[in-house]
Image (cartoon, rainbow, N blue to C red):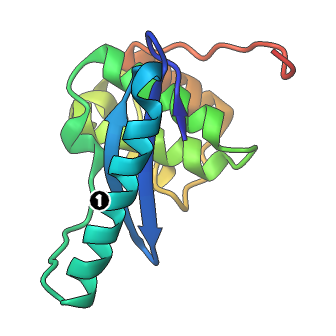
């Protein structure tokens, strides 16, 4: 996973079934070798914890962490970049941002129902492009394009 922001952050993570664990988020190139060793050590400790059944988890909800317009914009851009053409990831990210900002207010600003927004912006949703554009405008977000080979 790559997040383009300032110097370029590196995110080290492991995935075990449905469990995704962010191990380390760093941005300095000179410490990359040390960071990789640290991430591998943390992954090993996580595996030991899982094997010992001492780990309890709760579902991750991105909406909890999306506090600023900048965070929302970066989150949506990361979803677009990582989607590999799968619109469900982008729509789910837009739904996370909508829930973080407040679905009732968004419904008022878009003229859509709250229930309709929840349905359209769920991972299983299939909103029209017009709905996506209304939601983006109401959230203060713009969609941008660039050549695919850039």
Location of the N terminus by quadrant is top right
- The answer to whether 28 is drawn above or below residue 86 in the figure is above
User: Where is residue 4 drawn, in percent x and y?
Assistant: 52, 20
Q: Which residue is mark 1?
A: 42
- Left or right: 8, with 65 as reference point: right
> Which structural element holds mark 1?
helix
Looking at the image, can residue 115 be seen?
A: no
- Residues 129 and 47: in front is 47
- Left or right: 78, with 52 as reference point: right
- The answer to whether 143 is drawn above or below residue 79 in the figure is above
Q: Most extreme residue toward the bottom, as rendered?
A: 52
User: Where is residue 149 drawn, in percent x and y?
Assistant: 87, 20
- Left or right: 147, with 81 as reference point: right
Location of the C terminus by quadrant is top right
Residue at left offset 57%, top offset 41% = 90
- Residues 10 and 116: in front is 10
- The answer to whether 13 is drawn above or below residue 16 in the figure is above
User: Where is residue 69 drawn, in percent x and y?
Assistant: 31, 16
- The answer to whether 60 is drawn above or below residue 104 in the figure is below
- Residues 4 and 65: in front is 4
Looking at the image, can residue 107 be seen?
A: yes
How many C-alpha atoms fall within 10 Å of the one at disc 1: few (<14), some, or many (≥20)?
A: some
- Left or right: 19, with 64 as reference point: right
User: Where is residue 27 drawn, in percent x and y?
Assistant: 40, 23
Q: How many marks?
A: 1
Residue at left offset 26%, top offset 80% = 48
Residue at left offset 46%, top offset 78% = 17
Residue at left offset 57%, top offset 49% = 89
């Amino acid at each position: 996973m790559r997040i383009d922001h300032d110097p370029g952050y590196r995110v080290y993570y492991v995935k075990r079934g449905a469990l995704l664990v962010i191990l380390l988020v760093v941005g300095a190139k000179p410490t990359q070798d040390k960071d990789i060793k640290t991430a591998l050590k943390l992954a090993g400790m996580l595996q030991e914890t899982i094997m010992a059944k001492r780990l309890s988890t709760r579902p991750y909800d991105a909406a909890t962490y999306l506090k600023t317009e900048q965070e929302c914009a970066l989150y949506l851009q990361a979803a677009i970049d990582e989607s590999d053409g799968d619109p469900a990831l982008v729509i789910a990210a837009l739904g996370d941002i909508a829930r973080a900002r407040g679905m009732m207010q968004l419904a008022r600003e878009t003229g859509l129902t709250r229930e309709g927004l929840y349905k359209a912006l769920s991972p299983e949703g299939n909103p029209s492009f017009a709905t996506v554009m209304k939601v983006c405008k109401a959230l203060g977000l713009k969609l941008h394009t660039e050549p695919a080979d850039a």
